[in-house]
Image (tube, helix red, strand yellow):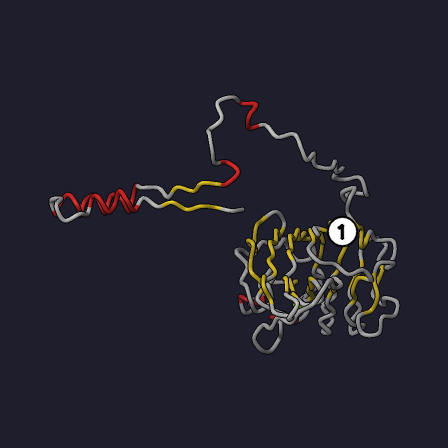
Amino acid sequence: MKQIYLSAFILAGLMSCNNAPKQLAEKTAEQDKKEAPSVIVYEEYSGEDPTKPEETEVYEPVPPKVNPTEKNGAPSDAIVLFDGKNFDQWISTKDSAAVDWHLNDDGSMTVKNKAGDIQTKKNFGSVQLHIEWKSPAEIQGENQSRGNSGIFLQNLYEVQVLDNNDNDTYANGQVGSIYKQSIPLAMASVPTGEWNTYDIIYHAPEFNAEGEKIKSATITVIHNGVLIQDHTEIKGATSYIGWPKNEAHGKSPLRLQDHGDNSRVSYRNIWVRELD
Ligand code: MG
């Protein structure tokens, strides 16, 4: 949105001119800093100020109707990636073969130790993602080896899943972090063994024809209703070792992590709404 910024510099300039008494000029300049608002004029709201309510009513475009729970709790325009029945939307990351994780009777799936990550068959760009996860009630391991999994947007950018209840670790690798890039605003986990929800708004990065990044990915994460990542810039792939690097890529799968240490994290009710 085009914005035109107008400052109050003319007023400040008049008040601080040489002819004005020094005390008055200083006071006014100080007041000006505190009180004078910046004026932002939006192009579509410039011109004559309307005098009738009808002049500011807009009827098009009409947003599409979405039934928020039509698909067994998922919105009518969502792509349901996992509803507990099968792994039809997923493949093994290491060999593209059928998923070898546990499919449970309660409509969830559980990471099978050392079976490897799984990823969606479909590629995604910007999405709204809903996903639920649970750490195993039986506690094993500590630090990064307790209930560790992860949700990788576009196969590259990890939102950490970890059992952090009475289990400290580095803050930029704790539950809800953008792994090794962004500490969450809060630790909002439910007790170990209960279901957590992540609601994620993710905007994919943009690259020019030369492969240079022109816009970083951004992510907002709501953990059990609590905002923990607020339009966070993702600076590159979330690496275990090394600085984040961002090479050009297009739409890519959503990936779930097998951390390889018997972390036994479970997932259920996974759906996305595509935003591009
Ligand atoms: Mg992880």
Mark 1 neighbour density, 10 Å: few (under 14) some (14–19) many (20 or more)? many
Q: Is residue 37 left or right of residue 54?
A: left
Position of residue 78 measured from the top left corner of the image (x, y, whole percent)? 77, 47
Residue at 74% across / 35% down in the picture?
Answer: 65
Instruction: Residue at the far top: name it.
Output: 52
Residue at 63% across / 62% down in the picture?
Answer: 205
Judging depth in this view, the residue of 247 and 191 nearest the camera is 247
Residue 13 visible in this rendered orientation of the protein: yes
Within the image, what quadrant is residue 76 found in? top right
Position of residue 258 measured from the top left corner of the image (x, y, whole percent)? 74, 69
Q: Is residue 244 left or right of residue 257?
A: left
Within the image, what quadrant is residue 120 found in? bottom right
Judging depth in this view, the residue of 230 and 226 nearest the camera is 230
Residue at 52% across / 56% down in the picture?
Answer: 185
Position of residue 61 measured from the top left corner of the image (x, y, whole percent)? 68, 35
SS type, badge 1? strand
Residue at 73% across / 74% down in the picture?
Answer: 260
Q: Give the amino acid at mark 1.
A: Trp
Instruction: Residue at the far front: name it.
Output: 47
Q: Is residue 105 left or right of residue 183?
A: right
Judging depth in this view, the residue of 93 and 59 nearest the camera is 59
Asked whether mark 1 lies closer than 8 Å to ligand 1, one says no
Q: Is residue 48 left or right of residue 260?
A: left
Q: Which residue is mark 1?
A: 271
Position of residue 171 measured from the top left corner of the image (x, y, whole percent)? 53, 66
* Number of numbered discs visible in the structure rendering: 1
Residue 151 visible in this rendered orientation of the protein: no
